[in-house]
Amino acid sequence: MKNYIILLAALMYFLAAHNVAAQTTEENEGVAFVHDKTFDQALAQAKQEGKMLFIDCYTSWCGPCKMLASKVFPQKKVGDYFNEVFVSMKVDMEKGEGVELKKRFAVKAFPTLLFISNDGKEINRIVGAELNIDKFLKNVKEGIGENSLSAMNERYAKGERDMEFLIDYLEALGRAYDTKKCEEVTALLLEGNEKYMLEKEELYNAFIKYNKCPLSSACLYVMDNKEAFEAKYDKTKLNQTLDFMWMAYPYKFIQKNEDGTCSFDEEGMNAYKAEMKKRKVAKADEICLNVDIALAEAQKDWKKYASLCDRHIKKYGEEDMTLYNWVLRIQKNCSDPVVKKKATDWMKRRLDNIAKEKANEKPLPPGVMRAMPMVNFEAQYEKLIKELEK
C-alpha cells in the first residue's frame, strides 16, 4: 500500500511537471507576454529594445478574447513575428491599471489590440478576433506600416481624398471599429461616385457597411436603381440594409436634454415621412409608430407608451426581443400599476402563444436537434411577471 501511494505521488508529480513544461514550451513558442509590468514599464522596455508596444485589451467575460488567447497568441508563427517586433502585454480592462488605460485609449469593445510606438503614440488598433493566422498577421503588418491608421489619419487630415486611398482608409477604420469616422469617410467616398457602385464592388461594400443615412445621395441613388442593384448583388442583404437605414435614422429627431426633458424635431420628422411616402418605403407606417413609442418613452408618458405598444402588437404581431425590451423599460422606469398590469398581460398572452406554437411543432427527423434560441424568453417573461406583480 505504501509503495502504491509513493508510485501514485510520483506519477502525479510527473504529470504536473509535464503539464508545466508543456505550457512553458507553448508560451515560449507563441507571443512572450511580459508579466507584472505597468504600462510605463512595458513602454520603457520597448524603447530600450527598439520595439513597439503591443497591448491585448481583454476582459474576463469576453469569448473572442479567450479565442485569441488560446488559438492565436500561442502559435509559433505569431510568436516569431510579435517577439521580434513588439514588447507585448495583456491588460484586463476592468481591473487595476486597465480601467485607466481603457479611458486613456478610448477602448469601447473587446478584444481591442493596440499597437503603440515606443514614445507612447498609438499607431494602430484592431478590434475583434481574427482566428485565421495568416490573415491576422497580414492585418497586423499592414496596420503598422505605411498604411497604419495613424499615418492614414495624417494623410486624411492633410486633405488626401482620392478614391483608392479612401477605400484603404475605410478598411483600416473598420478594423479599428471607428464607426463614426467610417460613416464620415463613406459619405465623402460615395458623393459624386454613386453610379460607380454598380461597377466597383468596394464602393458598394462601403455603402452596405457604413452608410447610415437613407437621405444620402448614395442611398437615394440605390433606391432609384434598386432593380439593377438587386440583379448584381445579394438582394436579401440589400433590402435588409435599406430597411435598417430607414428604421434607425429617425430616432435622431428625438434629443434628450441635460435637465431630463426631451426635444422633438417635428418638422424634420414630417419631412422624413414625406420622403418615405415619395420613396414608397414598405415599412413607413411601422417606422412612424416606433418613433412615437420612443418619443413617449423619452417624455415619460407611460400610459401613451403602453397604448402605442398595444397598437404595435395588434398590427404587427409579437416579436420577443421587442416585447421584452418594452416590458423591461416599464419595469425599470414606470410606477403606474395600470401600465404594469398591461405589460404583464402582454407577457402572459405571449407565454400562452409560445405554448401553442410548441404544441403545434412538427417532430424533427431522427438525429436532428431543434435550434436553441439565444435568449430564453419564457424564463425572462416569468421573472418579469413576478417582479411586476409584487
Image (spheres, rainbow, N blue to C red):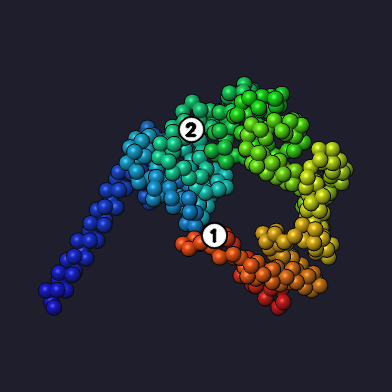
Residue drawn at (51%, 61%) of the image: 365
Counting the numbered discs, the total is: 2
Q: In the figure, 27 relative to 7: above or below?
A: above
Badge 2 crowding class, 10 Å Cα cut-off, few under 14, some 14 to 19, many 20 or more, is many
- Measured from the top left, where is residue 293 in percent x and y? 79, 56
Q: What residue is drawn where x is 48% and y is 45%?
A: 129
Name the front one of labels 2 and 1.
1
Residue 143's tag is 2
Q: Which residue is mark 1?
A: 371
Q: Is residue 176 visible?
A: yes
227 displayed left or right of 314 = left
Q: Residues within 10 Å of mark 1 (few under 14, many from 20)?
A: few
Indicate the amino acid at tag 2.
Answer: Gly
| x and y, in percent, of residue 92 in the image | 47, 53
**Of helix, strand and loop, which one carries label 2?**
helix
* Horizontal and vertical percent position of residue 36: 38, 51
Quarter of the image with the C terminus in it = bottom right
- Name the quarter where the N terminus is drawn: bottom left
**Is residue 241 rendered to the left or right of residue 279?**
left
Q: Is residue 156 visible?
A: no
Residue nearest the viewer, comparing 211 with 91: 211
Q: Residue at x 83, y 63 (%)?
A: 307
What secondary structure is found at the residue carrying circle 1? loop
Quadrant assignment, res 265: top right
Residue sitting at 53 percent across and 62 percent down?
364
Q: Is residue 244 above or below residue 367?
A: above
Choose between 363 and 386: the one closer to the eye. 363
Query: Of 323 and 122, which appears nearest the observer?
Result: 323
- Dot 1 amino acid type: Ala
Q: Earlier in the sequence, mark 2 or mark 1?
A: 2
